[in-house]
Amino acid sequence: MNNNRAKKWLKQLPKHLILWSVTLIMLAPFYWMVTTSLKPYSKVLQFPPQWWPQPIAWSNYVDLFKLQPFHLYMFNSLYIAVVVTVGTCIFAALAGYAFAKLQFPFKNTIFLILLSSMMIPTEVTAIPMFTWLGKLGLVDTHFPLIFPPMLGAGGMFGVFLCRQFFITIPNDLDEAAKIDGCTPWRTFYRIMLPLASPAMATLSIFTFLHSWNEFFEPLVYLSSSKLYTIPLALSLFTTESGTQWHLIMAASVVATLPLLTVFFFAQKKFIEGVAMTGMK
């Protein structure tokens, strides 16, 4: 029995070594970010590098909020990401259910046309969008960071994800609901939407991460520093006299915590949603 266990362990050893090696490679940048955020400015770029901060400069996190209103940037990023995530999930679930279960003229053609919007890079539409929003007086507001992502390529990705998930749900449930007198709306929110919780969790994580990390659109549309999001605010720690790497790393640690929290609480549904979406 012990020999069989030893043989099995030796057989799996290369696989575990590869997994641990890949894990260490992926965790190394996070370790460097955290340790650098705790180093004094004079120790950040020293050679040979200091693998563990001595002394530990907890004051970097205090200075982060003293030098810049970082709490305001965090609030801007958080509320934009939450609104975009909630709006995208509502829009994607409704449209995905319609394309998967309802019958209407040119359904597949309309879906393909909308799906093609995912092939258009944001940079291509940036200038016409900026011109149009400028005429409406919506530049230098959070409007361009909320509604276009919900209804644009990001929202269409959610529609595609939800449609693929709803297709996997047997039509017998729809037919049984119709026999019981349910309207399509009631069938959606009482039966289909609860079953789609893995897809919703997956879409929520993707959307939240994308909105939280978005840099290009805030750079184009925002000019007032009080409206900055975290990715744009990180540039404020670079001046003509140099880059405050210890504060940038401290800000990066603070910015990463909400992402880790979201993924930690939704990881089970996220993995389940990725595994099941597209199966038929």
Image: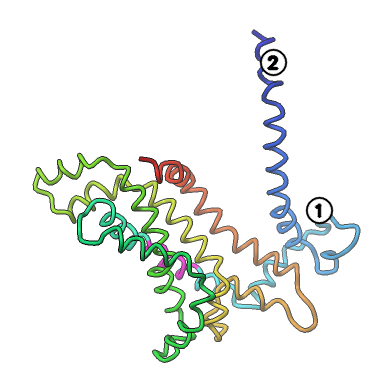
Q: Does 114 appear above or below 271?
A: below
Of 158 and 72, which appears nearest the observer?
158
Residue 8 in the image: state x and y as whole percent: 66, 18
Q: Residue at x 39, y 62 (%)?
A: 115
Circle 2 crowding by C-alpha within 10 Å: few under 14, some 14–19, many from 20:
few
What span is in magenta?
Answer: 78-88
The residue where tag 1 is placed is 52
Residue 82 in the image: state x and y as whole percent: 43, 65
Residue 264 highlighted magenta (yes or no): no
Distance, label 1 to label 2, CA atoms, is 39 Å
Rendering colour mode:
rainbow
The amino acid type found where label 2 is placed reads Lys
Q: Does 228 appear above or below 182?
A: below
Q: Is residue 264 left or right of residue 33?
A: left
Q: Is residue 266 left or right of residue 34?
A: left
Q: Residue furthest right?
A: 48
Q: Residue at x 59, y 77 (%)?
A: 69
Residue 121 in the image: state x and y as whole percent: 51, 70
**Quadrant in which the C terminus is drawn:** top left
**Quadrant in which the N terminus is drawn:** top right
What SS does tag 1 mark?
A: loop
Q: Which mark is residue 7?
A: 2
Give the dominant element type of the magenta stretch: helix, strand or loop.
Answer: helix
